[in-house]
Amino acid sequence: MTPNNSMRNVLLASMLVASAATTAAQPTRPPLTAAEFALQAVSERPRTYASFCIASNPAMKVGFERALSDLSMRVQDIGKSLLASEPFEPLTHKTVPQILVDAFEEQNGELLSQLKATNAAPSCARFLANVDRIDGDLLKAGVMQALSSVQAALAAIEKGMLK
């Protein structure tokens, strides 16, 4: 494994701990800031799991939509206060590099493939309950981890360690 691949894998792994996966920047939408990207990453992995669960059991759609909406609002609230702090505020002024968007898309696709391959449908009700009752401190730690991971990835890109 080359140093670039090694560093990339370490950064991706740390971002996945924080539920990092996100959708691609759409052509009609301006590029995301690094801050927006990090916050979306926290909600995207649960959203991918939810889309799998809803496809397996459409009756879960309403529950997942409510839980994901609540999760997204909580992430935004936590993110707003963290992004006002000195360590994370610079992320609001940087555009997320395409390499990070591509890596998240790849991980998101892999997650969906794993869910399908392992028949994860029986765990959907438990997953919905977990999203519903995620602890505020745990969620804040996840948001902080996502912001820190994006910072580390941006620093690695600036140093030429990720291309």
Image: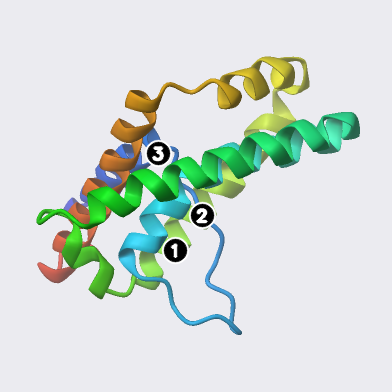
Q: Find disc 2 in the rendering and name its residue.
A: 22
Q: Earlier in the sequence, mark 3 or mark 1?
A: 3
* Left or right: 56 in relation to 156: right
In space, the residues marked 2 and 3 are separated at their CA atoms by 11 Å
Crowding near the residue tagged with mark 2, few <14, some 14–19, many ≥20 C-alpha atoms within 10 Å: many
Q: Where residue 3 appears, x then y in whole percent?
A: 17, 52
| Residue 101 tag number | 1
Q: Amino acid at mark 3?
A: Leu
Residue highlighted by disc 3: 16
133 versus 52 height, above or below? above
Whether the residues at callouts 2 and 1 have beta carbons within 8 Å, the answer is: yes
Residue 4: tell me if it is visible.
no
- Residue 128, x across and y down, in percent: 67, 24
Identify the residue at horizontal 62%, vertical 44% (top origin): 69
Q: Amino acid at mark 1?
A: Val
Is 118 drawn above or below residue 8 in the view shown? above
- Figure quadrant of residue 116: top right
The image shows residue 45, relative to residue 23, as above or below, that is above
If you read the primary sequence from the N terminus, does the residue marked by circle 2 or circle 1 appear first? 2
Residue 146 location, x and y as percent?
A: 32, 45
Mark 2 → mark 1, Cα distance in angstroms: 7 Å
Residue sitting at x 52%, y 53%: 106
Q: Nearer the viewer, residue 108 or 136?
A: 136
Q: Could you tell me how far apart the alpha carbons at marks 3 and 1 are, in whole angstroms?
A: 13 Å
Check disc 3 and report its element: helix, strand or loop: helix
Q: Image check: 77 left or right of 61?
A: left
- How crowded pointer 3 is (Cα within 10 Å; few <14, some 14-19, many 20+) is rated as many
